[in-house]
């Protein structure tokens, strides 16, 4: 799946990106079209779907647009990891420049997750690029200077603290610019979920320290702030997806309230949605569904990846395949692990297509 995404990202002609109507909502293709600072103005002016503020930022910060483009590969991969065992598996639609088809135009909890994880991915990518010295407009966190204290005593700020505040500010300015032009419920929903995604990255900032002194005496400590692994943000937002809160628009159009009064009011960390999700059992571009025909299922599972659930009651086919794998691995002093090549036969179960549908393509995750 990663190969497919990279092929779309770097090999699709820019003229196709400009002319494809479905690209109107995809700022995720910035990295594919902004290839050099000398041509950034021309490219930014021709990317469909950008509002004026986004075009201005694109022209002024072409190197950040490259980071945003590369970061999209990372957050899309994370999204697919989180939903790899579910009917909707965050798989992109081949030859569809909006990545997820019309899913992004809906107000379901899947759309909420995509907005949150994409916003988090931009924050993570920009912040990391700042710390690695890849961007002219930012560097390490300039506020982490001097001395401070924690539960272990005093320490000095040193090293390169991740400049998370810069990443959040730029992501908020760029991503939210389009939503702020809208006045409808979907715009408010997207703004809320974008913010939840940004907060998810900052939530896992952690203090790392190094001791200095004779024989590790730790007479002096130097510390810095670092982002946690992006998987932590993905896991966190996945839990928020599970507990996403359905809301309705206020009568005055300025916000929303919970659809069911038995549930608590959503916080800034929660994901919100308006529409119920489809079942994603069959291929339907209008809802962003690839269907589950051909997906691998687990015959012994009772969860979402079970053949009963994944195949939507259509049944499944079983194929016996032979594969090579490493086995009988042993550690040899010093210092290698040696394994044998073993041949094993396994049964693979794949969901049947709906009756009357000829299934030809492989959409397995």
Image (tube, helix red, strand yellow):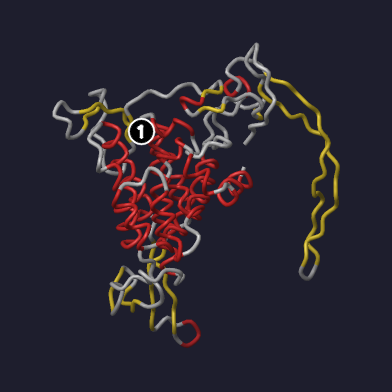
Q: Residue at x 78, y 71 (%)?
A: 334
* Relative to 78, residue 214 above or below: below
Q: Residue at x 29, y 53 (%)?
A: 173
User: How far from the left and from the top, in percent, is residue 255?
Assistant: 19, 34
Query: Residue farthest to the top?
Result: 356
Q: Name the residue nearer the viewer: 105 or 163.
A: 105
Secondary structure of the residue carrying numbered label 1:
loop
Query: Residue farthest to the bottom?
Result: 214
User: How far from the left and from the top, in percent, is residue 339?
Assistant: 82, 55
Q: Name the residue nearer the viewer: 65 or 318.
A: 65
Provide the residue designation for mark 1.
244
Instruction: Determine crowd level at label 1: few under 14, some 14-19, many 20+ residues with C-alpha closer than 10 A.
Output: many
Q: Name the residue nearer the viewer: 6 or 215.
A: 6
Q: Is residue 114 left or right of residue 4?
A: left
Q: Residue at x 35, y 33 (%)?
A: 244
User: How far from the left and from the top, in percent, is residue 329?
Assistant: 79, 54
Q: Quadrant of the C terminus?
A: top right
Q: Name the residue nearer the viewer: 170 or 19.
A: 19
- Report the number of numbered marks: 1
Q: Quadrant of the N terminus?
A: top right
* Relative to 338, residue 349 above or below: above
Query: Residue farthest to the left?
Result: 252
Q: Residue at x 37, y 71 (%)?
A: 140
User: How far from the left and from the top, in percent, is residue 358?
Assistant: 68, 18
* Relative to 331, residue 110 above or below: above
């Amino acid at each position: 799946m990663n190969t497919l995404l990279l092929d779309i990202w770097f090999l699709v002609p820019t003229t196709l990106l400009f002319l494809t109507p479905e690209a109107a909502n995809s700022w995720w293709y910035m990295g594919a079209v902004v290839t050099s600072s000398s041509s950034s103005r021309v490219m930014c002016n021709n990317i469909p779907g950008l509002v004026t503020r986004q075009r201005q930022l694109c022209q002024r910060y072409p190197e950040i647009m490259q980071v945003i483009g590369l970061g999209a590969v990372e957050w899309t991969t994370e999204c697919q990891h989180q939903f790899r065992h579910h009917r909707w598996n965050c798989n992109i639609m081949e030859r569809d420049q909006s990545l997820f088809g019309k899913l992004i135009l809906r107000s379901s909890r899947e759309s909420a997750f995509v907005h949150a994880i994409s916003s988090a991915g931009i924050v993570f990518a920009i912040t990391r690029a700042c710390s690695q010295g890849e961007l002219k407009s930012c560097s390490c966190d300039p506020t982490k200077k001097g001395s401070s204290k924690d539960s272990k005593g005093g320490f000095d700020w040193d090293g390169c603290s991740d400049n998370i505040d810069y990443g959040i500010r730029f992501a908020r300015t760029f991503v939210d610019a389009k939503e702020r032009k809208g006045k409808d419920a979907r715009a408010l929903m997207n703004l809320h979920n974008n913010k939840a995604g940004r907060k998810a990255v900052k939530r896992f900032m952690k203090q790392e320290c190094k001791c200095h002194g004779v024989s590790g005496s730790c007479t002096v400590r130097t510390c810095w702030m670092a982002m946690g692994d992006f998987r932590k943000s993905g896991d966190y937002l996945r839990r928020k997806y599970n507990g996403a809160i359905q809301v309705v628009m206020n009568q005055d159009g300025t916000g929303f309230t919970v659809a069911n009064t038995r549930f608590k009011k959503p916080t800034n960390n929660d994901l919100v949605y308006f529409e119920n999700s489809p079942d994603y059992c069959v291929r339907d571009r209008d809802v962003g569904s690839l269907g589950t025909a051909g997906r691998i299922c687990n015959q012994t599972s009772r969860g979402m990846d079970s053949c009963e659930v994944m195949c939507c009651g259509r049944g499944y086919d079983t194929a016996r395949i032979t594969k090579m794998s490493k086995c009988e691995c042993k550690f040899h002093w010093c210092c290698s692990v040696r394994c044998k090549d073993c041949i094993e036969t396994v049964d693979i179960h794949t969901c049947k297509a709906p009756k009357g549908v000829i299934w030809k393509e492989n959409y397995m995750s």
